[in-house]
Image (tube, coloured by chain):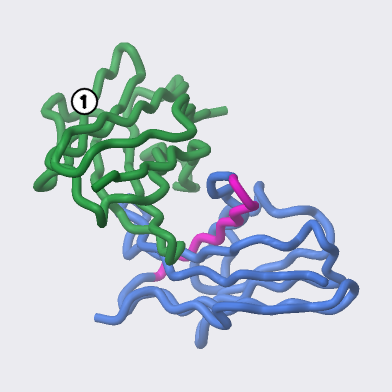
Chain colours: A green, B blue
Amino acid sequence: AQTVTQSQPEMSVQEAETVTLSCTYDTSESDYYLFWYKQPPSRQMILVIRQEAYKQQNATENRFSVNFQKAAKSFSLKISDSQLGDAAMYFCAYRRTQGGSEKLVFGKGTKLTVNP
Amino acid sequence: NAGVMQNPRHLVRRRGQEARLRCSPMKGHSHVYWYRQLPEEGLKFMVYLQKENIIDESGMPKERFSAEFPKEGPSILRIQQVVRGDSAAYFCASSPLVTDTQYFGPGTRLTVL
């Protein structure tokens, strides 16, 4: 079974600085999707960024970028120019691309605090 | 295009009562997923449905829990004879195609007294 591990329960960053959140996963599949979701205090799950495993280029969305290392099964999220509104729980998630059930497998999350 | 809708947002039940959670997917989405989030935990998959079909219920407890997605109307997650351990946030997500990104609703916070 696939597993997702986020080894940092909590992280903090100064406003305007850069922070990297770690995520590793375990799978025997060769093609899959990886996601980072943000959950602010409102508890709404918000998609931050998505990566397709067959694409070697790292995904970017404005201040958010990933470092996808397929061989190492690592998928870290970098937040540049951190803003107060970035404070939230961040969840890494995995999804296989085939097989009839495309459920997401989540890590336990990293709580990010942004200090003014 | 309205997002995924869930109601109620908060639900309080006493032990032994039934809880009924509703999810209306985004327009054009025919795939619905239910996830449960226990306090201080990540989301855990429960069930995946398409219209009138349960595709994968491998994450659903065998007893007291059921889900449906009828031809007309919202998807329903039903929990019978609730216990305190059922207290959690229940999230619904939808996607237009099986390979597309899942978009989440705001969740229903169930509290069992």
Question: Residue under circle 1?
Answer: A67
Local secondary structure at mark 1: strand
Left or right? Give the position of A101 relative to B82.
left
For the point 72% across and 62% down, the residue is B87
Residue A1 position (above or below residue A84): above
State the image coordinates of residue B28 (x, y, percent, origin top left).
31, 75
- Residue furthest out toward the bottom: B72
The chain under label 1 reads A
Q: Is residue B31 magenta?
A: yes
- Residue furthest out toward the top: A71
Secondary structure of the magenta portion, mostly?
strand
Residue segment shown in magenta: B30-40
Residue A25 position (above or below residue A89): above
Amino acid type of disc 1? Asn
State the image coordinates of residue A97 (x, y, percent, origin top left).
36, 39
Q: Nearer the viewer, residue A35 or A52?
A: A35
Residue B33 position (above or below residue B16): above
Left or right? Give the position of A25 relative to A79.
right
Left or right? Give the position of B69 relative to A110.
right
Q: Is residue A74 magenta?
A: no
Q: Nearer the viewer, residue B74 or B98?
A: B74
